[in-house]
Amino acid sequence: MSIQTPTLPTITGPAMLDQAFDEIATKLLTELSWLSNAYGDTQKLEEVYEGRKRTYPAIRSGQQEFLKLMPDSHLGNFSFCQALSGDVVEWNKKLVPWVTTEFSVVFWFDFRDIFPGTDTNKTLNNVKDLILTAFRTMSLSKSIMEIDKIYDVMVDVYDEYTFVYSDPDWIGTERIAMESGNLFYLRPYGCLRFEGTVRYLQNDGAYTC
């Protein structure tokens, strides 16, 4: 199956959380050779399917177009960032304030791409180890990042959203057991969620009056 690498709009002069997330995504691609795509800040979108509302993560791909970031091997092994809270501002009228945001990075992957030939002997903990090492060793200049939680169960990884995947249709989580097909949340596929905080200056530390 061919892997799609969509061309997304480039943010001109990214600021604050966009700048922090863009750097984290770029570093992940550098540190994890098996990662096909890494996306920055995502949005939670809603659509109606079979008369019922469902929500899913997406990133803007055009003026009014969005790329769905649900488990799908067409996108290869990918990650995306999302804010989990409002921005906490350490207000100081004379100095550029520090801003702190709780966030998560969600990963979807194929074990066979990460551990060619040995994937059947590997578990989610092996992938956790690789990703946590990448977070721990990456050098960031735009933010200070801390990871404090890891989730490896599908419903926890995609906690904010009301979907799972069954080829060829998206279905609700309550119907998982009744569906058949290529389920992209079962081996050889997997998903993980890393949560933490990211702390950054409003505008790279320039002083204001």
Image (cartoon, rainbow, N blue to C red):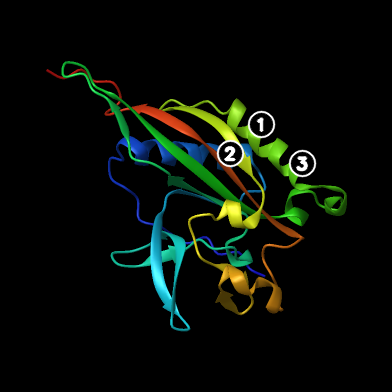
- Which label sits on residue 30? 2
Give the position of the C terminus as an image quadrant. Answer: top left
Q: Which residue is drawn at 66% across and 71% down?
A: 176
* Real-space Cα separation, disc 3 to disc 1, in angstroms: 11 Å
Dots 3, 2 in contact, CB < 8 A: no
Q: Above or below — where is 53 with respect to 108?
A: below
Q: Which of marks 3 and 2 is nearer the N terminus?
A: 2
Camera-side residue of 2 and 49: 49
Pinpoint residue 12: horizontal percent, then vertical percent: 28, 45
Q: Residue at x 42, y 44 (%)?
A: 84
Q: Above or below — where is 68 with respect to 160?
A: below
Q: Which residue is drawn at 26% across and 23% down?
A: 97
Q: Which of marks 1 and 2 is nearer the N terminus?
A: 2
Camera-side residue of 133 and 47: 47
The residue tagged 1 is 133
Dots 3, 1 in contact, CB < 8 A: no
**Three-letter amino acid code at the position of disc 1:** Thr
Q: Is mark 3 on a helix, strand or loop?
A: helix
**Three-letter amino acid code at the position of disc 3:** Asn
* Real-space Cα separation, disc 3 to disc 2, in angstroms: 19 Å
Q: Residue at x 43, y 40 (%)?
A: 21
Pinpoint residue 181: horizontal percent, then vertical percent: 71, 78
Examine the image and state in which quarter residue 3 appears: bottom right
Q: Is mark 2 on a helix, strand or loop?
A: helix
- Which label sits on residue 38? none
Q: What element carries label 1?
A: helix
Pinpoint residue 169: horizontal percent, then vertical percent: 58, 79
Q: Which of marks 1 and 2 is in front?
A: 1
- Which label sits on residue 126? 3
